[in-house]
Image (spheres, rainbow, N blue to C red):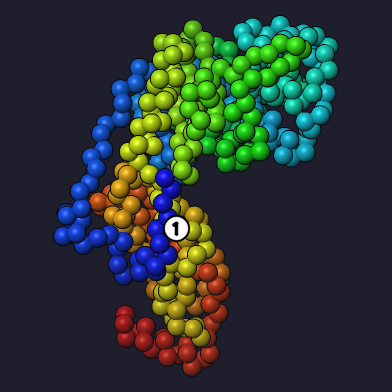
Amino acid sequence: MTYRLPLFALFTALTLTFALPAAEAQQRPRMPTPEAPQIDASSYILVDFNSGQVIADKNADEQVDPASITKLMTAYIVFSELRAGNVGLDDLVTVSKKAWQAEGSRMFIEVNDQVRVEDLIRGMIIQSGNDASIALAEHLAGGENTFATWMNQHAERLGMHQTHYENATGLTGPAHKSSARDIATLVAALIEEFPEYYRLYSEREFTYAGITQSNRNRLLWRDNSVDGVKTGYTKAAGYCLASSAERDGMRLISVVLGTPSMRAREQASESLLNYGFRFFESVQVATQNEAVANAKIWKSSAENVQLGPSQTTFVTVPRGRADDISLKPQLDQRLIAPVTAGQQLGALNISLDDEKLASVPLVALQAMPLGSLWQRLRDEVLLFVKR
């Protein structure tokens, strides 16, 4: 459940840490947080979407074959081009012989068919069609090799440091690799940047050319909170599943790679998601541009400047520990006018049990121009005395 700290607590943060006195904290029983479940996978990661914090992981940066989870990046580029207006959902794509001959899962398009972009997207997402992925790549970039270069550029921009793409489908290639952490990063980007298209990942079936195929993500049937994302399988990769679920405002992303069976990847993903929701919670500790403190400012007509966080910030803590979160503003130096609105003046440090969870920049919420000559001279003298 997402929990937001009350506003009055933030206003007191400049002089007090937001935590109970030691005596009270000791009296309140704390629910123990068990270790993450044992997962039969070569690598995995569980991430809180709101905060970006990792709840559990194993070999999360190990480079492995991503199989059809690759298609998440193919979709990311398609969505980007739709957003930019460079392609439309009703645009027709001519199917090439290469796309028609694609190995593995297919949506069964034929050579020289004219297929709508929207149908190809559904064929790629729901049916995991390799033919649809190649057709889209060729339509957008002129060829799959060029499209793969484009995929790598986006991966670099998103900070996917263990990822290198050779194709748009996920078919095994000598240097076609990714990692659980990188895949979780990509899933988060899809959810955040393209909510209008992300909903396609929750669709359970798609019919094309009279052939109905079901979504391979069986968690969509087992758990109503799951709304995506993508399965994958090759002999080299094993059975893989990137999934996401939202319960009571808390969204988790799970990536499980290299499991021995379809059933194993589903059980592993379900175990991780249930563990995260049961034992952790997202806490909103800062709201963008909402005043959290007043700080003394020198050489201005005003005595104080209001400070607020530059961005809305969540942290992930064990369930029941929200009241123990500590907020400590830290100013860079004495504040001296002039100050512009939005200028960073310090940071709001967020911690639990002396462990730093996050730090968000504190900015001036309004401009603070220089005061009168008298005010500037007076404060100059006072600053000299203090020094």
Question: In front: 87, or 209?
Answer: 209
| Mark 1 neighbour density, 10 Å: few (under 14) some (14–19) many (20 or more) | many
Q: Is residue 373 left or right of residue 272?
A: right
53, above or below 105, in the image: below
Q: Is residue 367 left or right of residue 78?
A: left
Question: In front: 52, or 300?
Answer: 52
Dot 1 falls on a residue whose secondary structure is strand
Residue plotted at (39% across, 21% down): 268
Q: How many marks?
A: 1
Residue under label 1: 286
Residue plotted at (45% across, 83% down): 303
Q: For the C terminus, which image quadrant? A: bottom left
63, above or below 294, in the image: above
Residue plotted at (38% across, 31% down): 274
- Residue 280 position within the rendered picture, expressed as x and y whole percent measured from the top left: 35, 41
Q: For the N terminus, which image quadrant? A: top left
Q: Is residue 352 visible?
A: yes
Q: Amino acid at mark 1?
A: Ala
- Residue 162 position within the rendered picture, expressed as x and y whole percent measured from the top left: 47, 27
Q: Residue furthest bottom?
A: 374
- Residue 66 position within the rendered picture, expressed as x and y whole percent measured from the top left: 51, 19
Q: Is residue 267 left or right of residue 185?
A: left
Q: Is residue 212 left or right of residue 65?
A: right
Residue plotted at (17% across, 54% down): 26
- Residue 145 position within the rendered picture, expressed as x and y whole percent measured from the top left: 67, 19
329, above or below 281, in the image: below
Q: Is residue 165 visible?
A: no
12, above or below 137, in the image: below
Question: In front: 333, or 356?
Answer: 356
